[in-house]
Amino acid sequence: MVIKRFNDKHEMAKAAAGEAAGALRKAIKDKGRARIIAATGAAQFEFLETLTGLPGIDWKKVEMFHLDEYIGISASHPASFCRFLQERLIQKTGISTCHLLSGEQDPADVIRSAGKALQSAPIDVAFVGVGENGHLAFNDPPADFETEEPYLIVTLDEACRRQQLGEGWFATLDDVPRKAMSMSVRQILKAEKIICIVPDSRKANAVKACFEGSICPQAPASILREHEDTTVYLDKNSAALLSPDTLAQNLSGEPKT
């Protein structure tokens, strides 16, 4: 794993999108298609805006898998991650093959179908973030580091639900769903490349816990340190609590595990 720090989220997004675009172009050239996992949420705004504007990506040859979704909300709801992906990625690029997780259908059926498609071939690149509680996708602490199931039905903890409220997706805490569908930790780690985008000072505590503390289920995103090709993109605010030694080692290109 390599950590890269930038002065602001716009510089960070530009660099992350450049790496992502390169991975997509290479997969399409080598394999005839690229298979990706797409994250959502406020942390992804600048990254997706930049990525979708870059030239030279044949999006018709990209197959997209959905990382997580709330159970019980419609695709028209402002907080729907299906809606987020439609507006910020799918409609902008014309991706032709998308495996979205419907929050309105039976969740067991949804994750069974998506999981079968997901496991049919390798994933070239996964875009992920880190939650304020250290979660990876909707795998809140303590995360399941053992299951090989591609998707899980999970219960969201209060810290996660408060983050969604704080980001403005819901009017009250009671409106935030308590259940969600989430790609499992082990499934995320099967991606050949992982690009992790984590801006903003509200993520600084989680960044420190996950990338300087122990690798453990209480800090779910810490597991990314076990992946051979993960790059974590931080701005100066999210990186504010990291030690100089951590940043020096990782910015030199040496993996910190």
Image (cartoon, rainbow, N blue to C red):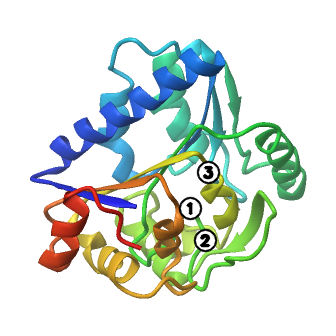
> Would you say the residues marked 2 and 1 are in contact, meaning their CB atoms lie under 8 Å apart?
yes
Q: Tell me which residue sits at (35%, 13%) in the image.
A: 55
Residue located beneath label 2 in the image: 139
Question: For residue 218, which numbered disc appears in the image?
Answer: none
Measured as percent of width and height from the top left, residue 84 is found at 50, 40
**Alpha carbon of mark 2 to alpha carbon of mark 1: how far?**
6 Å
Secondary structure state at the residue bearing disc 2: loop
Q: Tell me which residue sits at (74%, 76%) in the image.
A: 146
Residue located beneath label 3 in the image: 67
Task: Give whichever of 55, 250 is nearer the camera.
Answer: 250
Q: Is residue 16 above or below residue 142?
A: above
Mark 3 belongs to which amino acid? Answer: Leu
Task: Give whichever of 138, 34 is nearer the camera.
Answer: 34
Judged from this view, the residue extending furthest toward the left is 7
Q: From the viewer's perspective, is 210 left or right of 191?
A: left
How many numbered tags mark residues here? 3
Mark 1 belongs to which amino acid? Answer: Ala
**Alpha carbon of mark 1 to alpha carbon of mark 3: how far?**
6 Å
Q: Is residue 13 above or below residue 237?
A: above
On-image quarter of the C terminus: bottom left
Q: Is residue 106 above or below residue 225?
A: above
Q: From the viewer's perspective, is 254 left or right of 7?
A: right
Q: Tell me which residue sits at (62%, 56%) in the image.
A: 188
> Would you say the residues marked 1 and 3 are in contact, meaning their CB atoms lie under 8 Å apart?
yes
Q: From the viewer's perspective, is 180 left or right of 85?
A: right
Residue located beneath label 1 in the image: 137
